[in-house]
Amino acid sequence: MNNNNKNRFSFKKSDNSSKIHGLLPYRRSPIEIESSEQYGYDNIEYNLAESSVPDLKMKDLNLDLQNLALSYGDHLGNPELRHYIAKDGKDLTPDQVLITSGASAALFIIASSLLKPGDHAVILHPNYVTNIETPRAIGCKSYYLKLSFEEKFRLDFEKLGAMIKPDTRLVSLTYPHNPTGTTINEADLNRVISLVESKGCYLLLDETYREMTFNTTMPIAATLSSNAISVSSCSKSFGLPGIRIGWLITQDETLMETFLAAKEQIFICNSVIDEEIAAHFMTKKEHIFPKIKEHIQTNFKTIKTWMEKNDYLEWVQPSGGCVCFPRIKPDIQVDLEKFYKLLIENYKTLVGPGYWFEMDRKFMRIEYGWPSKQELEGGLESIIKAVQESLI
Ligand SMILES: Cc1ncc(COP(=O)(O)O)c(C=O)c1O
Protein backbone atom coordinates (compact mmCIF):
# COMPACT_ATOMS: atom_id res chain seq x y z
CA MET A 1 0.00 0.00 0.00
CA ASN A 2 1.14 3.49 -0.76
CA ASN A 3 2.65 4.94 2.42
CA ASN A 4 0.95 8.29 1.88
CA ASN A 5 -2.34 6.59 2.27
CA LYS A 6 -2.83 6.33 6.00
CA ASN A 7 -6.54 7.07 5.71
CA ARG A 8 -7.40 4.21 3.39
CA PHE A 9 -11.08 3.35 3.60
CA SER A 10 -11.77 5.61 6.52
CA PHE A 11 -15.17 6.13 4.84
CA LYS A 12 -15.10 9.80 5.75
CA LYS A 13 -13.76 13.10 4.60
CA SER A 14 -10.73 14.51 6.29
CA ASP A 15 -11.48 17.45 8.54
CA ASN A 16 -8.76 19.77 9.82
CA SER A 17 -11.02 22.51 11.10
CA SER A 18 -10.87 21.46 14.75
CA LYS A 19 -7.05 21.24 14.73
CA ILE A 20 -6.15 24.80 13.74
CA HIS A 21 -8.65 27.56 14.32
CA GLY A 22 -9.62 29.62 11.28
CA LEU A 23 -8.47 27.25 8.53
CA LEU A 24 -10.56 27.35 5.37
CA PRO A 25 -12.55 24.10 5.34
CA TYR A 26 -10.66 22.38 2.54
CA ARG A 27 -11.31 18.69 3.08
CA ARG A 28 -9.79 15.74 1.34
CA SER A 29 -12.54 13.68 -0.16
CA PRO A 30 -12.72 9.85 0.00
CA ILE A 31 -12.56 9.79 -3.81
CA GLU A 32 -9.04 11.25 -3.57
CA ILE A 33 -7.94 9.52 -0.35
CA GLU A 34 -9.04 6.13 -1.67
CA SER A 35 -8.16 6.60 -5.35
CA SER A 36 -6.27 3.82 -7.10
CA GLU A 37 -3.10 5.89 -7.43
CA GLN A 38 -3.10 6.50 -3.66
CA TYR A 39 -3.92 2.89 -2.83
CA GLY A 40 -1.22 1.73 -5.25
CA TYR A 41 -2.02 0.30 -8.68
CA ASP A 42 -0.04 -2.83 -7.80
CA ASN A 43 -2.41 -3.63 -4.94
CA ILE A 44 -5.42 -3.82 -7.27
CA GLU A 45 -6.06 -6.66 -9.67
CA TYR A 46 -9.37 -5.45 -11.12
CA ASN A 47 -9.44 -1.69 -11.27
CA LEU A 48 -12.98 -0.49 -11.94
CA ALA A 49 -12.50 2.76 -10.03
CA GLU A 50 -10.95 5.03 -12.66
CA SER A 51 -13.04 7.45 -14.70
CA SER A 52 -11.06 7.54 -17.90
CA VAL A 53 -9.68 5.42 -20.74
CA PRO A 54 -6.40 3.45 -20.88
CA ASP A 55 -3.45 5.72 -20.15
CA LEU A 56 -1.29 6.51 -23.17
CA LYS A 57 2.46 6.10 -23.00
CA MET A 58 5.07 8.49 -24.35
CA LYS A 59 6.00 5.91 -26.98
CA ASP A 60 2.40 6.02 -28.33
CA LEU A 61 2.99 9.67 -29.20
CA ASN A 62 6.45 9.36 -30.73
CA LEU A 63 7.47 12.86 -29.68
CA ASP A 64 10.98 14.29 -29.57
CA LEU A 65 11.28 17.00 -26.91
CA GLN A 66 15.08 17.40 -27.04
CA ASN A 67 14.95 20.96 -28.42
CA LEU A 68 12.08 22.22 -26.31
CA ALA A 69 13.14 25.35 -24.40
CA LEU A 70 12.24 24.93 -20.73
CA SER A 71 11.14 28.53 -20.39
CA TYR A 72 7.89 29.94 -19.02
CA GLY A 73 5.08 29.41 -21.49
CA ASP A 74 2.33 31.65 -22.86
CA HIS A 75 0.14 32.51 -19.87
CA LEU A 76 -3.12 31.67 -21.66
CA GLY A 77 -1.52 28.42 -22.73
CA ASN A 78 0.40 26.97 -25.68
CA PRO A 79 -1.07 28.74 -28.77
CA GLU A 80 -1.05 25.61 -30.94
CA LEU A 81 -2.94 23.69 -28.27
CA ARG A 82 -5.49 26.49 -27.88
CA HIS A 83 -5.85 26.60 -31.66
CA TYR A 84 -6.80 22.89 -31.76
CA ILE A 85 -9.24 23.24 -28.88
CA ALA A 86 -10.87 26.31 -30.45
CA LYS A 87 -11.24 24.51 -33.81
CA ASP A 88 -13.73 22.20 -32.13
CA GLY A 89 -16.26 24.97 -31.38
CA LYS A 90 -18.27 27.12 -33.76
CA ASP A 91 -16.74 30.62 -34.05
CA LEU A 92 -14.46 29.92 -31.09
CA THR A 93 -11.09 31.70 -31.07
CA PRO A 94 -7.89 30.58 -29.29
CA ASP A 95 -7.97 33.63 -26.97
CA GLN A 96 -11.29 32.36 -25.55
CA VAL A 97 -9.48 29.26 -24.27
CA LEU A 98 -7.45 29.23 -21.04
CA ILE A 99 -5.25 26.18 -20.43
CA THR A 100 -5.19 25.04 -16.81
CA SER A 101 -3.62 22.32 -14.75
CA GLY A 102 -6.35 19.75 -15.43
CA ALA A 103 -10.07 20.45 -15.45
CA SER A 104 -9.93 20.51 -11.65
CA ALA A 105 -7.84 23.72 -11.65
CA ALA A 106 -10.27 25.26 -14.14
CA LEU A 107 -13.16 24.42 -11.81
CA PHE A 108 -11.28 25.90 -8.85
CA ILE A 109 -10.47 29.10 -10.76
CA ILE A 110 -14.08 29.55 -11.85
CA ALA A 111 -15.59 28.90 -8.40
CA SER A 112 -13.06 31.09 -6.59
CA SER A 113 -13.51 33.92 -9.12
CA LEU A 114 -17.30 33.92 -9.19
CA LEU A 115 -18.33 32.95 -5.67
CA LYS A 116 -17.93 34.74 -2.35
CA PRO A 117 -19.00 33.49 1.08
CA GLY A 118 -22.80 33.52 1.26
CA ASP A 119 -23.29 33.61 -2.53
CA HIS A 120 -25.97 31.38 -3.94
CA ALA A 121 -25.09 28.53 -6.31
CA VAL A 122 -27.18 25.68 -7.69
CA ILE A 123 -25.09 22.54 -8.10
CA LEU A 124 -25.98 19.20 -9.63
CA HIS A 125 -25.66 16.38 -7.09
CA PRO A 126 -24.01 13.87 -7.12
CA ASN A 127 -21.10 15.40 -8.98
CA TYR A 128 -17.35 15.38 -9.44
CA VAL A 129 -15.85 16.37 -6.10
CA THR A 130 -14.33 19.78 -6.98
CA ASN A 131 -17.71 20.99 -8.23
CA ILE A 132 -19.10 20.38 -4.76
CA GLU A 133 -16.16 20.97 -2.42
CA THR A 134 -14.73 24.27 -3.70
CA PRO A 135 -17.99 26.25 -3.39
CA ARG A 136 -18.42 24.60 0.02
CA ALA A 137 -14.93 25.62 1.16
CA ILE A 138 -15.55 29.18 -0.04
CA GLY A 139 -18.61 29.25 2.21
CA CYS A 140 -21.13 29.81 -0.50
CA LYS A 141 -24.77 28.72 -0.10
CA SER A 142 -24.94 25.63 -2.28
CA TYR A 143 -28.36 24.33 -3.23
CA TYR A 144 -28.15 20.82 -4.61
CA LEU A 145 -30.21 19.73 -7.55
CA LYS A 146 -30.42 16.06 -6.60
CA LEU A 147 -30.59 13.36 -9.23
CA SER A 148 -32.52 10.27 -8.26
CA PHE A 149 -32.41 6.70 -9.48
CA GLU A 150 -36.22 6.54 -9.49
CA GLU A 151 -36.27 9.45 -11.98
CA LYS A 152 -33.58 7.77 -14.07
CA PHE A 153 -31.10 10.47 -12.97
CA ARG A 154 -32.92 12.87 -15.33
CA LEU A 155 -32.32 16.62 -15.12
CA ASP A 156 -35.56 18.18 -13.85
CA PHE A 157 -35.91 21.54 -15.60
CA GLU A 158 -38.89 22.61 -13.50
CA LYS A 159 -36.91 22.02 -10.30
CA LEU A 160 -33.84 23.74 -11.72
CA GLY A 161 -35.90 26.78 -12.78
CA ALA A 162 -37.46 27.01 -9.31
CA MET A 163 -34.08 26.74 -7.57
CA ILE A 164 -32.54 29.67 -9.44
CA LYS A 165 -33.25 32.77 -7.34
CA PRO A 166 -32.63 36.43 -8.22
CA ASP A 167 -29.35 36.28 -6.26
CA THR A 168 -28.10 33.01 -7.81
CA ARG A 169 -24.61 33.54 -9.21
CA LEU A 170 -23.82 30.16 -10.66
CA VAL A 171 -25.51 27.01 -11.94
CA SER A 172 -23.01 24.18 -12.00
CA LEU A 173 -23.75 21.11 -14.13
CA THR A 174 -21.67 18.21 -15.40
CA TYR A 175 -22.60 16.45 -18.66
CA PRO A 176 -21.95 13.72 -19.65
CA HIS A 177 -22.45 13.12 -15.98
CA ASN A 178 -20.02 11.65 -13.50
CA PRO A 179 -20.90 9.30 -11.78
CA THR A 180 -24.08 8.24 -13.63
CA GLY A 181 -23.01 8.45 -17.30
CA THR A 182 -26.27 10.19 -18.22
CA THR A 183 -26.25 12.90 -20.89
CA ILE A 184 -28.35 15.82 -22.07
CA ASN A 185 -29.00 16.69 -25.71
CA GLU A 186 -28.54 19.98 -27.51
CA ALA A 187 -32.16 21.04 -26.97
CA ASP A 188 -31.76 20.44 -23.21
CA LEU A 189 -28.55 22.43 -23.18
CA ASN A 190 -30.26 25.33 -24.96
CA ARG A 191 -33.05 25.17 -22.41
CA VAL A 192 -30.56 25.47 -19.54
CA ILE A 193 -28.80 28.34 -21.28
CA SER A 194 -32.08 30.23 -21.82
CA LEU A 195 -32.79 29.75 -18.13
CA VAL A 196 -29.47 31.17 -16.91
CA GLU A 197 -29.66 34.03 -19.42
CA SER A 198 -33.16 34.96 -18.31
CA LYS A 199 -32.13 34.83 -14.63
CA GLY A 200 -28.87 36.70 -15.22
CA CYS A 201 -26.50 34.11 -13.77
CA TYR A 202 -23.69 31.95 -15.14
CA LEU A 203 -23.71 28.33 -16.22
CA LEU A 204 -20.60 26.31 -15.49
CA LEU A 205 -20.79 23.19 -17.64
CA ASP A 206 -18.17 20.61 -16.80
CA GLU A 207 -17.87 18.93 -20.21
CA THR A 208 -14.90 16.78 -19.35
CA TYR A 209 -16.57 13.73 -20.95
CA ARG A 210 -18.12 15.61 -23.91
CA GLU A 211 -16.29 13.66 -26.58
CA MET A 212 -17.31 10.36 -25.02
CA THR A 213 -21.03 10.77 -25.72
CA PHE A 214 -22.32 7.60 -27.40
CA ASN A 215 -24.50 9.42 -29.93
CA THR A 216 -24.37 13.05 -31.05
CA THR A 217 -21.69 15.12 -29.32
CA MET A 218 -23.07 18.30 -27.77
CA PRO A 219 -21.75 21.69 -28.88
CA ILE A 220 -19.33 23.37 -26.47
CA ALA A 221 -21.67 25.27 -24.12
CA ALA A 222 -19.49 28.41 -24.06
CA THR A 223 -19.99 28.81 -27.83
CA LEU A 224 -23.75 29.20 -27.28
CA SER A 225 -23.76 32.06 -24.79
CA SER A 226 -21.47 34.45 -22.98
CA ASN A 227 -23.25 33.32 -19.78
CA ALA A 228 -21.90 29.79 -20.24
CA ILE A 229 -18.42 28.68 -19.19
CA SER A 230 -17.13 25.32 -20.42
CA VAL A 231 -14.53 23.13 -18.77
CA SER A 232 -12.77 20.14 -20.25
CA SER A 233 -9.55 18.17 -20.14
CA CYS A 234 -7.10 15.79 -21.77
CA SER A 235 -7.36 13.47 -18.76
CA LYS A 236 -10.53 11.51 -19.40
CA SER A 237 -11.27 11.09 -23.11
CA PHE A 238 -7.68 11.01 -24.26
CA GLY A 239 -5.94 8.95 -21.56
CA LEU A 240 -3.53 11.71 -20.57
CA PRO A 241 -4.28 12.43 -16.88
CA GLY A 242 -0.59 12.52 -15.96
CA ILE A 243 0.17 15.61 -18.02
CA ARG A 244 -2.40 17.65 -16.05
CA ILE A 245 -3.79 19.60 -18.99
CA GLY A 246 -7.33 20.96 -18.89
CA TRP A 247 -8.99 24.17 -19.99
CA LEU A 248 -11.86 26.55 -19.59
CA ILE A 249 -13.64 28.44 -22.35
CA THR A 250 -15.52 31.72 -22.15
CA GLN A 251 -16.55 34.36 -24.69
CA ASP A 252 -16.65 37.01 -21.99
CA GLU A 253 -13.44 39.07 -22.03
CA THR A 254 -13.83 40.37 -18.47
CA LEU A 255 -14.32 36.87 -17.12
CA MET A 256 -11.32 35.66 -19.11
CA GLU A 257 -9.12 38.44 -17.72
CA THR A 258 -10.16 37.49 -14.17
CA PHE A 259 -9.62 33.77 -14.78
CA LEU A 260 -6.20 34.47 -16.29
CA ALA A 261 -5.26 36.61 -13.28
CA ALA A 262 -6.34 33.77 -10.96
CA LYS A 263 -4.29 31.29 -12.98
CA GLU A 264 -1.22 33.57 -12.87
CA GLN A 265 -1.55 33.84 -9.11
CA ILE A 266 -1.70 30.06 -8.70
CA PHE A 267 0.80 28.78 -11.25
CA ILE A 268 1.57 31.54 -13.84
CA CYS A 269 1.54 29.13 -16.74
CA ASN A 270 1.38 25.38 -17.37
CA SER A 271 4.39 23.12 -17.73
CA VAL A 272 5.66 23.65 -21.27
CA ILE A 273 6.42 19.93 -21.48
CA ASP A 274 2.85 18.99 -20.65
CA GLU A 275 1.50 21.52 -23.11
CA GLU A 276 3.80 20.27 -25.87
CA ILE A 277 2.61 16.70 -25.31
CA ALA A 278 -1.04 17.80 -25.37
CA ALA A 279 -0.55 19.88 -28.54
CA HIS A 280 1.18 16.95 -30.19
CA PHE A 281 -1.65 14.61 -29.17
CA MET A 282 -4.14 16.98 -30.83
CA THR A 283 -2.30 16.60 -34.15
CA LYS A 284 -2.76 12.81 -33.84
CA LYS A 285 -6.19 12.80 -32.23
CA GLU A 286 -8.02 11.71 -35.38
CA HIS A 287 -5.95 8.53 -35.48
CA ILE A 288 -5.86 7.74 -31.76
CA PHE A 289 -9.33 8.70 -30.56
CA PRO A 290 -11.43 6.30 -32.72
CA LYS A 291 -9.54 3.37 -31.14
CA ILE A 292 -10.27 4.74 -27.68
CA LYS A 293 -13.99 5.01 -28.52
CA GLU A 294 -14.01 1.48 -29.89
CA HIS A 295 -12.52 0.19 -26.63
CA ILE A 296 -15.23 2.01 -24.61
CA GLN A 297 -17.98 0.55 -26.81
CA THR A 298 -16.60 -3.00 -26.58
CA ASN A 299 -16.44 -2.78 -22.79
CA PHE A 300 -19.85 -1.11 -22.65
CA LYS A 301 -21.35 -4.18 -24.35
CA THR A 302 -19.69 -6.39 -21.74
CA ILE A 303 -21.07 -4.44 -18.79
CA LYS A 304 -24.51 -4.10 -20.39
CA THR A 305 -24.76 -7.88 -20.83
CA TRP A 306 -23.58 -8.37 -17.25
CA MET A 307 -26.15 -5.89 -15.93
CA GLU A 308 -28.94 -7.59 -17.87
CA LYS A 309 -28.01 -11.04 -16.56
CA ASN A 310 -27.19 -10.49 -12.91
CA ASP A 311 -29.86 -10.73 -10.21
CA TYR A 312 -28.32 -8.38 -7.68
CA LEU A 313 -27.78 -4.97 -9.25
CA GLU A 314 -29.90 -2.53 -11.23
CA TRP A 315 -28.83 0.52 -13.22
CA VAL A 316 -29.84 3.48 -15.29
CA GLN A 317 -28.14 2.67 -18.56
CA PRO A 318 -25.54 5.35 -19.35
CA SER A 319 -25.49 7.21 -22.66
CA GLY A 320 -22.01 8.70 -22.48
CA GLY A 321 -18.71 8.81 -20.63
CA CYS A 322 -17.13 5.63 -19.27
CA VAL A 323 -18.80 5.18 -15.88
CA CYS A 324 -22.15 3.96 -14.63
CA PHE A 325 -23.75 4.13 -11.21
CA PRO A 326 -25.69 0.93 -10.47
CA ARG A 327 -26.99 -0.04 -7.06
CA ILE A 328 -27.60 -3.27 -5.22
CA LYS A 329 -31.36 -3.78 -5.54
CA PRO A 330 -33.29 -2.32 -2.58
CA ASP A 331 -34.88 -5.67 -1.66
CA ILE A 332 -31.49 -7.41 -1.41
CA GLN A 333 -30.08 -7.21 2.11
CA VAL A 334 -26.32 -6.99 2.17
CA ASP A 335 -23.77 -6.23 4.88
CA LEU A 336 -22.25 -3.33 2.97
CA GLU A 337 -19.22 -2.96 5.23
CA LYS A 338 -18.40 -6.60 4.58
CA PHE A 339 -19.13 -6.28 0.85
CA TYR A 340 -16.63 -3.45 0.25
CA LYS A 341 -14.04 -5.08 2.50
CA LEU A 342 -14.29 -8.42 0.70
CA LEU A 343 -14.25 -6.72 -2.66
CA ILE A 344 -10.95 -4.95 -2.11
CA GLU A 345 -9.20 -7.29 0.31
CA ASN A 346 -10.19 -10.72 -1.03
CA TYR A 347 -10.98 -9.97 -4.64
CA LYS A 348 -8.57 -7.06 -5.14
CA THR A 349 -11.32 -5.22 -6.98
CA LEU A 350 -11.76 -1.48 -6.60
CA VAL A 351 -14.99 0.36 -7.46
CA GLY A 352 -16.16 3.83 -6.40
CA PRO A 353 -18.51 3.25 -3.42
CA GLY A 354 -21.60 5.48 -3.20
CA TYR A 355 -20.11 7.46 -0.29
CA TRP A 356 -17.44 8.84 -2.66
CA PHE A 357 -20.35 10.85 -4.05
CA GLU A 358 -22.27 11.43 -0.80
CA MET A 359 -24.75 8.77 -1.91
CA ASP A 360 -26.02 5.60 -0.28
CA ARG A 361 -23.44 2.79 -0.14
CA LYS A 362 -25.71 0.50 -2.13
CA PHE A 363 -24.67 2.59 -5.13
CA MET A 364 -21.27 2.06 -6.67
CA ARG A 365 -19.56 3.73 -9.58
CA ILE A 366 -18.25 1.13 -11.97
CA GLU A 367 -15.92 2.34 -14.65
CA TYR A 368 -15.64 0.33 -17.85
CA GLY A 369 -13.48 2.56 -20.09
CA TRP A 370 -10.09 2.05 -18.45
CA PRO A 371 -9.69 -1.72 -17.86
CA SER A 372 -9.02 -4.33 -20.50
CA LYS A 373 -12.01 -6.53 -21.40
CA GLN A 374 -10.54 -9.35 -19.27
CA GLU A 375 -9.95 -7.07 -16.31
CA LEU A 376 -13.49 -5.73 -16.57
CA GLU A 377 -14.96 -9.24 -16.71
CA GLY A 378 -12.86 -10.33 -13.71
CA GLY A 379 -13.93 -7.29 -11.69
CA LEU A 380 -17.61 -7.77 -12.49
CA GLU A 381 -17.39 -11.41 -11.45
CA SER A 382 -15.77 -10.34 -8.16
CA ILE A 383 -18.65 -7.95 -7.46
CA ILE A 384 -21.15 -10.80 -7.75
CA LYS A 385 -19.07 -13.06 -5.49
CA ALA A 386 -18.66 -10.31 -2.88
CA VAL A 387 -22.43 -9.60 -2.91
CA GLN A 388 -23.22 -13.31 -2.53
CA GLU A 389 -20.83 -13.64 0.39
CA SER A 390 -22.28 -10.54 2.12
CA LEU A 391 -25.96 -11.44 1.91
CA ILE A 392 -27.75 -11.15 5.23
C1 LIG B 1 -16.42 15.52 -14.31
C2 LIG B 1 -14.98 15.73 -14.00
N1 LIG B 1 -14.46 16.97 -14.07
C3 LIG B 1 -13.19 17.21 -13.80
C4 LIG B 1 -12.33 16.20 -13.43
C5 LIG B 1 -10.89 16.51 -13.14
O1 LIG B 1 -10.08 16.04 -14.16
P1 LIG B 1 -8.60 16.54 -14.41
O2 LIG B 1 -8.27 17.54 -13.39
O3 LIG B 1 -7.74 15.34 -14.38
O4 LIG B 1 -8.64 17.13 -15.80
C6 LIG B 1 -12.82 14.90 -13.30
C7 LIG B 1 -11.96 13.81 -12.83
O5 LIG B 1 -12.39 12.72 -12.52
C8 LIG B 1 -14.17 14.65 -13.62
O6 LIG B 1 -14.70 13.43 -13.56
Image (cartoon, helix red, strand yellow):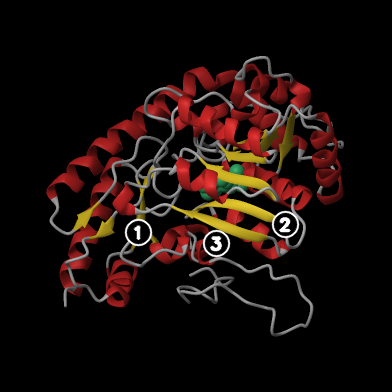
Which of the pair 294/59 is nearer the observer? 294
The quarter of the rendered structure image containing the C terminus is bottom left
Identify the amino acid type marked 2: Asp
Image position, residue 322 (x, y; %): 40, 41
SS under mark 2: loop
Q: Is residue 64 left or right of residue 350?
A: right
Please report the residue visible at 35 percent of the width from the left and 27 percent of the height from the top: 294
Please report the residue visible at 12 percent of the width from the left and 48 percent of the height from the top: 309
SS under mark 1: strand
Q: Decide: is 33 above or below 302.
A: below
State the CA–CA distance, disc 1 to disc 3.
16 Å
Image position, residue 315 (x, y; %): 26, 49
First in sequence: mark 1 or mark 2? 2
**Label 1 sits on residue:** 364
Q: Is residue 78 left or right of residue 381?
A: right
**Label 2 sits on residue:** 119
Identify the amino acid type marked 3: Glu
Which of the pair 100/146 is nearer the observer? 146
